Each structure stands twice: as structure tokens, then as C-alpha cells.
Amino acid sequence: MARAATASRSDTTAEHLAAWRRRVDDALAACCARYLDGVEPTTADAIRYSLLGEGKRLRPILALAAYEAAGGDGDASALAAAVEVVHAYSLVHDDLPCMDDDDVRRGRPTVHRVYGVRAATAAGLAMVPLAARAASDAATALGIARAAVGEIVRALMRASGAGGMIGGQLLDLEAEGRALSLLELERIHAAKTGALITAAVIVGGIAAGASRAVLDALEGYGQRVGLAFQIVDDVLDVTATTDELGKTAGRDVALGKSTYPALLGVHGARARAEALVDEACKALAGEGLLTVTLEHLARFSISRRS
């Protein structure tokens, strides 16, 4: 009976997440229709290509899960879609020849391979203010107070900027060919990967009117899940195939990057990721926020195969 109840709960969670994903995809399509009118045509096409392609949508779904856990009861899918715009921009720029120089993303050619380096660069740049405007409009439509709307936009922009993804990417590029300590590696990935995952749950919490204690718990959860996610990315880079990943396998070794498997071994890296997810769930449990969905998403971040 217990096994059947667990299976039923898992099926219900999967259905819930699938419905959220459809809503986020619809919101991304609406975002393109609303905000790309008047944008230079090739740049607009590159943005659409990036935003409407297949993806896990983990970050916007985390935003929705945090919004729900913190007591939000509106349709926050348009706000969650703004989080995905930031993530998509980072992928466009990560793949450029001057960065990680990759040809495949989400199972198809990268944006610069389809539209050229100039259009991909312009598209990524345009997606940052697009995300800010989309987040502001979506938060306002939810009836969120003006001060909280500003907090939401600031959280997203901090995550995308020099103290977040851009800074982390720069540190990552500078570290190529060097052997890093675990502390140095985690500093890079707390910014490059963890900052937006953390921002996603904080945005959900702010939108729901969460208290400072709840936001602090969500931040602790996001930081740990973000780092665990990156550790598993490193593991999959050496254990999965290009077809499984939807992007080129083995790039970390080819680029001379320090990785968690190189420092800890595959088994040790997985153990570190599992410990981080346990800590993430405890951070929420302490505030009564550990929903089935948030725990499922944390566990998924380390059990995934792509």
C-alpha cells in the first residue's frame, strides 16, 4: 500500500509539473509575440529560436513551486517565463566562439550556428532588458506592490550580472587550464549556475509576499540546489553521450576546465551533490516550506540524465 501511495503521489507531481511546463511554454510564446515587434528581424528570429526550443524549464518551474509554497495563488507563469528568458540568454552567450564555443544545445544547432555570431550576440544582449520588462509587467499584472516589483527585477538582474552569471562565466574562462581547489570551483559555480536558480525561488517568494525568514530559507535552498545541479552537469559531461545531453559531451575536458569529478571522482561528486540536496530540503523544512514539489525538483536536479 505504501508503495502504491508513493507511486500515486509521484504521478500527481509529474502531472502538476507537466501542466506548469505547458503554461511556461505558452507564456514564452506570448512573450515573443508581445515584445519582439520592432526588433531587427534576424535578432528577433534568434531570440525566438532560443526561447521556444526544448528545455527542462527547471528555473521557471522552481519559481512557480516557490510561489506556491510561499502561499501565492495567482497565475505566475508569465513571471516564471521571465526567469527562463534570463537563462536562455546565458546559454546563447555561453555557446559563442569566444566563450565555450559549442555547436549543439538542447539537441539542435546553437543560436550562433544558425544565425551567425553577430545576431547571437545581439540576441543575448537584447534578452536581458526583455527579461526585466517581462518580469516587471508580469509582476504588476499579478497585483504585486510596486516596491516588490522592483525587488523582483533587481533579483533577476543581480543574478544575470557581474555578481552572478557574467562574473561566474568570466571566472570560469579565466580558470581554463588551471587546477582549482574545491572552494575556488564552488565560488565560480555559485555565481555561474547557482545565482539564477537561487533568484528563481526568491522571485517566487517575493511574488507571494513571503516574509524575510521564508526568503532566507528559499535562498538557502536555491544556493544548494544550484551547486548540486552544476556538480551533476560536470558528472554528466564525462558519463553521458551527446545525444543524451542534447549538447556536446566531453567539453569540460576539451576546454581544460577544473570539474567536480576531476577533484572528487564521479562517486565523490555525486555524494557531494546528494549532501547538498539534503541540506537544501532541510533549509525549507525548518520554515515549513518543504512541499512535495520542491523536494521532487531538488532530487530531480541530481537524478536527471541531461
Image (spheres, grey):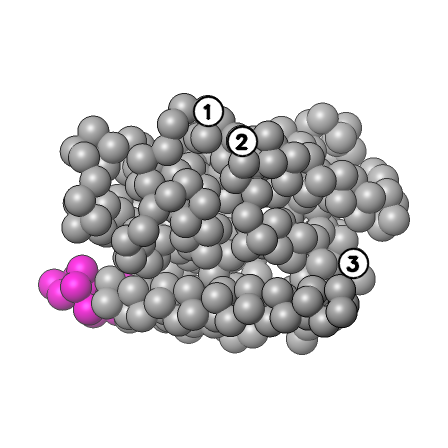
Q: Position of residue 291 (x, y in %)?
A: 55, 48
Cα gap from disc 3 to disc 2, whole angstroms: 37 Å
Q: Which residue has dot 1 on it?
A: 213
Q: Nearer the viewer, residue 287 or 239?
A: 287
Question: Amino acid type of disc 1?
Answer: Ala
Q: Which residue has dot 3 on it?
A: 238
Q: Nearer the viewer, residue 111 or 217?
A: 217
Query: Which label was assigned to residue 287?
Result: 2
Mark 2: few/some/many CA within 10 Å (<14, 14-19, 20+): some
Q: Position of residue 120 (x, y in %)?
A: 37, 60
Residue drawn at x 21%, y 40% is 144
From where the camera sits, is residue 96 visible? no
Q: Nearer the viewer, mark 2 or mark 1?
A: 2
Residue 287 position (above or below residue 118):
above
Give the magenta part as a residue range.
32-43
Q: For residue 29, which quarter of the picture? A: bottom left
2 and 1 marks in contact (CB < 8 Å): yes
From where the camera sits, is residue 235 visible? yes
Q: Quick one: SS at disc 2?
A: loop
Of the numbered discs 1 and 3, the one sitting upstream in the chain is 1
Residue 146 relative to residue 25: left or right: left
Residue drawn at x 17%, y 44% is 143
Of the numbered discs 3 and 2, the one sitting upstream in the chain is 3
Q: Nearer the viewer, mark 1 or mark 3?
A: 1
Residue drawn at x 76%, y 30% is 182
Q: Quick one: SS at disc 1?
A: helix
Question: Amino acid type of disc 3?
Answer: Val
Question: Amino acid type of disc 2?
Answer: Glu
